[in-house]
Amino acid sequence: MKLKIITSNPGKVREYSAALSRLGIETEHMKIPYDEIQTSELSEVAEKGMDEIISKGVRDFILDDSGLFIDALNGFPGVWSAYAQKTIGNKGILKLMEGVENRGAEFRCCIGCDISGKRIVVTGICRGEITLSEKGTDGFGFDPIFTHDGKRTFAEIPLEEKNSVSHRGIAIQLLLAELEKLGLSR
Ligand code: ITT
C-alpha cells in the first residue's frame, strides 16, 4: 500500500515515513496547500482539509491537524497552535506559563486518511507537562518544551521513541487498527 503524506511540515514527514515504513506502508510526500478553517475541533479542520484535497483529484492520502493543549491556559494554543508557534513561539508559551504551577498539557493529533474511497478519522492524545525551559534539538515545533515522562523533552528523545509514545504515534496505531478492520492494512 502507498499513502501520500500531505503536509507542509518536514517534521511530520519524517515521523510518518519512519512509522509507516515499519508497517510495510510506502509513503510519498506531497505539499498541497489547503484551508485550515477556524473551529474548536481538530477533526473538523482535518475533514474539511480532506474534502479540499479530494476536490483537487488527489486520493489515497493522509493529513493531520495537531495541537498542544495546555491545561492552565484553558487549552490554548490548541487549534491555534500553528499560529502561536509562528508568532510567540516556544519562548512566548514559556512566558505565559511563568509562575504557573499546573504544568499539565497534552498533544493531540487528528489523522484524516482517504484510502480506497473510504475515509478514516482518528485522534491520538499524549499527556505530559510543559517544561520550565527549552531543551533538546531534535523534533520540531513545541517538542523542546513538552515532556511526556517528566524527564526528557520530545526534542531530547530519538524519533522512534517519540513515535512509540506520541499523539501522532498513537493516532497511527489507531489508523492501523481501522485499516485492519477494513481489510486494507496491506
Ligand atoms: P501542516 O498543517 O501543513 O501539516 P503545520 O505545521 O501547520 O503543518 P498543524 O497545523 O497540524 O501543522 O500543527 C500545529 C502546530 O503544532 C505547528 O506549529 C506544529 O509545529 C505543532 N506541532 C504539531 N505536531 C507537533 C509535534 O509532534 N511536536 C511538536 N509540535 C507539533
Image (cartoon, grey):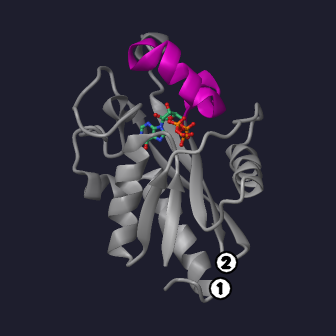
Does the residue tagged 2 have its C-beta within 8 Å of any atom of ligand 1? Answer: no
Mark 1 crowdedness (10 Å alpha carbons): few <14, some 14-19, many ≥20:
few
Q: Residue furthest front?
A: 57
Mark 2 crowdedness (10 Å alpha carbons): few <14, some 14-19, many ≥20:
few
Q: Is residue 113 left or right of residue 10?
A: right
Q: Which residue is mark 1?
A: 182
**Does the residue at mark 2 contact the one at mark 1 (Cβ under 8 Å)?**
yes
How far, Cα to Cα, is label 2 from label 1? 10 Å
Q: Which residue is mark 2?
A: 116
Q: Is residue 23 left or right of residue 84?
A: left
Q: Is residue 141 left or right of residue 44?
A: left
Q: Nearer the viewer, mark 2 or mark 1?
A: 2
Query: What type is the residue that disc 1 sits on?
Result: Leu
Q: Principal SS element in the magenta part?
A: helix
Query: What type is the residue that disc 2 sits on?
Result: Ser
Image position, residue 72 (x, y; %): 56, 24
Return the residue nearer the eye: 78 or 83.
83
What is the number of the mark on residue 62? Answer: none
Q: Secondary structure at mark 1?
A: loop
Q: Earlier in the sequence, mark 2 or mark 1?
A: 2
Image position, residue 36 (x, y; %): 69, 36
Image position, residue 92 (x, y; %): 45, 12
Segment tinted magenta in the rendering:
68-93
Image position, residue 3 (x, y; %): 51, 67
When the figure is inspected, residue 22 is found, relative to residue 69, above or below; the finding is below
Q: Secondary structure at mark 2?
A: loop
* Residue in the image at 75% along x and 49% along y: 52
When the figure is inspected, residue 153 is found, relative to residue 22, above or below; the finding is above
* Residue in the image at 40% along x and 51% along y: 13
